[in-house]
Image: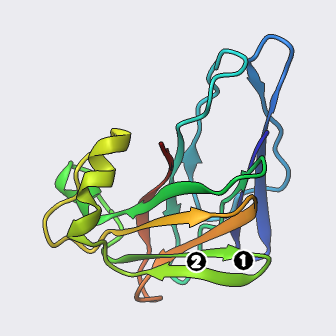
């Protein structure tokens, strides 16, 4: 099961993927999104195949936050790459891309890590999981962390609360 939720103000949109007998995913929404837009795709993954990554693109209003969640199942820690991409989207032709996204990983409300600008030393991890390269010196955010099994939230917002913009949030499972 993959459970993702997005919150903005007093509104929450929750998207839950549940595996059915055929190995395909179904979904359900609750809430009404306000001042944000995004998209998602339902994909068919063969039963037993691991999920390698999941992403969402959203328009975050000034002062708003994107707050998806994910679950590390099982009994062993997993290394993940989490990216909040804004400036590189602009370089790829996306108008109104977020200028300086930040990301914060939380477990049970406690901060696990925070990132403002990605580190060049993470480029090898980007390549190993098939993620596109980020612009040299861009203000995109990225974190590589080994996480214990459990439920996590990622808070994505613009460093300056006075502006918003389009942001792509990605979660990759590193092998």
- Please report the residue visible at 71 percent of the width from the left and 58 percent of the height from the top: 33
- Please report the residue visible at 53 percent of the width from the left and 37 percent of the height from the top: 52
Judge whether 151 appears above or below 92 on screen. below
Mark 1 secondary-structure assignment: loop
On the image, the x and y values in percent for residue 143 come to 43, 68
Q: How crowded is mark 2: few (under 14 residues within 10 Å), some or many (20 or more)?
A: many
On the image, the x and y values in percent for residue 38 come to 55, 49
On the image, the x and y values in percent for residue 70 come to 69, 55
**How many tags in the picture?**
2
Q: Name the residue under label 2.
A: 64
Q: Which quadrant would the N terminus be assigned to in this image?
A: top right
Q: Name the residue under label 1.
A: 9
**Gap between marks 1 and 2 measured at Cα:** 7 Å
Rendered image quadrant of residue 86:
bottom left
Q: Is residue 99 left or right of residue 37?
A: left
- Please report the residue visible at 49 percent of the width from the left and 61 percent of the height from the top: 59
Q: Is residue 93 left or right of residue 82?
A: left
Q: In this view, does 103 lie to the left or right of 46?
A: left
- The residue nearer to you, when weighing 93 against 123, is 123
Q: Do the residues labelled 1 and 2 touch (CB within 8 Å)?
A: yes
- Please report the residue visible at 38 percent of the width from the left and 42 percent of the height from the top: 129
- The residue nearer to you, when weighing 148 against 117, is 148
């Amino acid at each position: 099961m993959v459970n993702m939720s997005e919150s903005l103000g007093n509104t929450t949109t929750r998207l839950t993927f549940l595996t059915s007998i055929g190995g395909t995913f179904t979904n359900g929404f609750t809430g009404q999104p306000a001042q944000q837009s995004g998209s998602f795709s339902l994909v068919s993954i063969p039963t037993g195949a691991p999920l390698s990554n999941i992403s969402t693109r959203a328009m975050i209003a000034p002062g708003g936050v994107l707050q998806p969640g994910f679950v590390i199942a099982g009994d062993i820690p997993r290394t993940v790459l989490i990216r909040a991409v804004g400036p590189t989207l602009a370089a790829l032709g996306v108008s109104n891309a977020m200028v300086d996204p930040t990301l914060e990983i939380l477990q049970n409300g406690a901060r696990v890590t925070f990132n403002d600008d990605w580190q060049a030393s993470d480029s090898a991890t980007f390549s190993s999981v098939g993620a596109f390269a980020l612009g040299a010196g861009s203000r995109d955010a990225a974190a590589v962390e080994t996480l214990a099994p459990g439920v996590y939230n990622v808070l994505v917002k613009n460093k300056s609360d006075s502006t918003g913009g389009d942001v792509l949030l990605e979660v990759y499972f590193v092998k």
